[in-house]
């Protein structure tokens, strides 16, 4: 056998075998479900969401109907019991899935739902609490139709998430079909400089988020096509967070068909640390572009049919993705290497129907290797080994088309991986697997990699120091060397003001508190940007806790930064998706802090740090 993917320093591996028998319809099928599941609800071609919506330590399940004539949204506890007040009936059907996030930074996760409707066309984005209410300023309403599930991200580092989505006008109802790309603040207002109008362009893709040039700011990546040209070409766009073009031209690259919803994936394919952008289109082509819009050697590779959802990159934690997993409407599944070559014995065909789902990759059977949950077609739902054979007990026979994607979780909290799945059989399943529930054994466990739907393998989460939810003994100072925004230091009085410019020990307590959120269960490195006006490389004397009992420490790396600033790694620790409390307690020596970073990367991510003034 040949190793295709291996996570460093952990036991989980992604191995591609050189031989093996492919079982696609025979054998003893015995897929168990958790007690209390399945529940009957409604059909969908999307994915349920799983999140802890009340911070009680237990996850809830959120699912919807995609029927335009009879839309519903439901919530259940981990045992399959409907929550009080649910289900509810929105004005329009939910598009594919939900976005669980703390949109208003109040410490409680909301569920964003795109319930846009036709007749008249109207974009409606809800943000539901567990009790069915919504924050002030919500729902969002647009006179145009919104196609994708919203993406969220903190673009400006203030600790509050922005909502990112595209809307389109009624096709053929105006002289020119047009789209808008929106960045919405937490209170429902449009961010400055947004929306941006695209004339003669239908943008239906999600908004992927990544730091393409590794300068410390996020870019927005999305795509579309021209209805007037029958979608015969597709355009890939990349914008800075302020709406200015990332490249010399607004269009980063062009492909041979329109770019539809949920088809953009971002990961490293070449090893230069900058990510590549993978895009599927309405033809059976899988494209990959550099950040300057140039095609990557070997891409597009040999096709397997129309790939309708995001290609999933595997094990890029320390560099180049070692495999890319895709499913196609032809009923084929394939694993490519980063050069666009098939791993043997792929591609392989399954069932009699096509896949319209995104694959998931994790431990599904408890052995050392990772498996592929390929989703459903007709009449089966598939879980595959790396040689293409079925995971023991699979496939699950449903007898109907099942185009859903699924979400991985441990709903019953028994330490095993559960697959939460909803298809056309109007059931919400929770398949119980013997796979170990461990972030080290999950490569892609949900729609577009994470709860925020960034479409990016890596997460880089920047936070400006002055955005603390609470400060005791600190003050914000205007510091032009911090590139147009402030920094923080100990609050000034006569004694402390003198101490700030010396090495005098400060005995008065000082505390910073940040309510912060991460979109996926993963290991994160915490970095802090500190002002150093001398040549000292002494580590900052900061005692940091997360969630009250997890002391962050052990970091030893230092990275340069323009001007008098230095990045210090505080430590690395696993964090589950959701809201966390970060507390910085009582340093003994003067310190001036500018910026924080939580990153899933094992290497410091900034290659070309630039001013990030808002």
Image: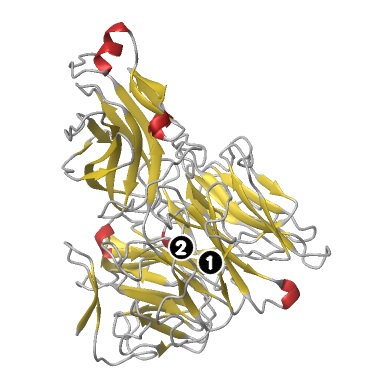
Quadrant containing the N terminus is bottom left
As displayed, is residue 32 above or below residue 144?
Answer: below
Q: CA distance from mark 2 to mark 1?
A: 7 Å
Q: Is residue 82 visible?
A: no
Q: In the figure, 556 relative to 472: above or below?
A: below
Could you tell me residue 230's position as x and y percent? 71, 78
Label placed on residue 262: 1
Q: Is residue 409 above or below residue 567?
A: below
Q: Is residue 483 left or right of residue 370?
A: right
Tell me the element at label 2: helix
* Image spot of residue 576 (x, y percent): 33, 49
Q: Residue furthest top?
A: 494
Contact, CB < 8 Å: mark 2 with mark 1?
yes
Dot 2: few (<14), some (14–19), or many (≥20) neighbours within 10 Å? many
- Whichever of labels 2 and 1 marks the residue nearer the N terminus, that label is 1
Residue 474 numbered mark, or none: none
How far from the left and from the top, in percent, is residue 235? 60, 69
Sort mark 1 into few (<14), some (14-19) or many (20+) by Cα contacts within 10 Å: many
- In the rendered structure, the answer to whether residue 456 lies left or right of residue 261 reads left
Q: Residue 536, percent across and down?
A: 18, 32
Residue at figure coordinates x 30%, y 27% from the top left: 592
Q: Which element type, helix, strand or loop, lies under badge 1?
A: loop
Residue on which disc 2 sits: 448
- Residue at 63 percent of width and 65 percent of height: 204
């Amino acid at each position: 056998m040949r190793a295709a993917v291996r996570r460093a320093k952990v036991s989980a591996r992604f191995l591609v075998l050189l031989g093996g028998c492919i079982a696609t319809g025979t054998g003893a099928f015995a897929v168990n479900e958790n007690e209390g599941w399945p529940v009957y609800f409604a059909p969908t071609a999307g994915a349920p969401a799983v999140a802890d919506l009340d911070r009680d330590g237990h996850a809830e399940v959120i699912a919807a109907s995609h029927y335009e004539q009879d839309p519903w949204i439901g919530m259940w506890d981990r045992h399959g019991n409907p929550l009080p007040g649910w289900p509810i009936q929105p004005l329009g059907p939910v598009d594919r899935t939900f976005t669980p996030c703390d949109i208003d930074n109040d410490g409680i996760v909301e569920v964003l739902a795109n319930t846009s409707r036709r007749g008249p066309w109207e974009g409606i984005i809800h943000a539901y609490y567990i009790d069915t209410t919504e924050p002030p300023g919500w729902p969002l309403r647009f006179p145009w139709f919104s196609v994708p599930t919203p993406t969220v991200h903190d673009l400006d580092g203030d600790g509050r998430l922005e909502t990112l989505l595209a809307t389109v006008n009624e096709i053929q109802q105006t002289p020119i079909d047009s789209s808008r790309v929106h960045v919405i603040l937490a209170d429902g207002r449009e961010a400055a400089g947004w929306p941006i109008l695209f004339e003669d362009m239908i943008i239906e893709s999600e908004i992927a988020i990544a730091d393409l040039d590794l300068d410390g700011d996020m870019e927005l990546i999305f795509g579309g096509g021209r209805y007037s040209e029958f979608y015969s070409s597709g355009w890939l766009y990349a914008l800075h967070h302020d709406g200015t073009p990332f490249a010399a031209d607004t269009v980063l690259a062009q492909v041979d068909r329109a770019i539809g919803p949920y088809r953009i994936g971002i990961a490293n394919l070449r090893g230069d640390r900058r990510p590549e952008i993978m895009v599927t289109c309405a033809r059976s082509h899988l494209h990959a572009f550099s950040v300057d819009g140039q095609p990557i050697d070997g891409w597009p590779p040999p096709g397997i049919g129309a790939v309708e959802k995001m290609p999933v990159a595997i094990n890029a934690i320390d560099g180049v993705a070692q495999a890319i997993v895709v499913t196609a409407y032809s009923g084929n599944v394939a694993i490519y290497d980063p050069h666009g070559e098939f791993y043997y014995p792929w591609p392989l065909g399954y069932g009699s129907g096509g896949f319209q789902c995104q694959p998931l990759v994790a431990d599904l059977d408890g052995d050392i290797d990772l498996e592929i949950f390929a989703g459903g077609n007709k009449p089966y739902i598939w879980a595959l080994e790396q040689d293409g054979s079925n995971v023991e007990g699979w496939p699950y026979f449903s007898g109907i088309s099942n185009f859903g994607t699924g979400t991985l979780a441990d709903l019953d909290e028994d330490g095993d991986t559960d697959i939460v799945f909803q298809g056309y059989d109007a059931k919400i399943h929770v398949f119980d697997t013997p796979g170990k529930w461990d972030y080290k054994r999950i490569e892609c466990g949900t729609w577009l990699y994470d709860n925020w739907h960034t479409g990016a393998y890596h997460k880089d989460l920047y936070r400006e120091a002055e955005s603390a939810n609470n400060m005791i003994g600190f003050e914000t100072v205007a510091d032009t060397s911090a590139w147009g925004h402030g920094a923080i230091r100990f609050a000034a009085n006569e004694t402390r003001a003198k101490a700030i410019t010396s090495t005098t020990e400060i005995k008065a307590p000082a505390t910073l508190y940040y309510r912060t959120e991460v979109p996926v269960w993963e290991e994160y490195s915490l970095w802090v940007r500190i002002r150093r006006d001398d040549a000292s490389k002494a580590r900052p004397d900061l005692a940091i806790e997360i969630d009250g009992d997890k002391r962050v420490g052990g970091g030893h790396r230092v990275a340069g930064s323009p001007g008098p600033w230095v990045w210090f790694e505080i430590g690395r620790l696993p964090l589950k998706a959701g809201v966390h409390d970060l507390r910085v307690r009582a340093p003994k020596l003067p310190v001036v802090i500018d910026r924080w970073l939580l990153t899933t990367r094992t290497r410091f991510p900034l290659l070309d740090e630039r001013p990030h003034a808002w």
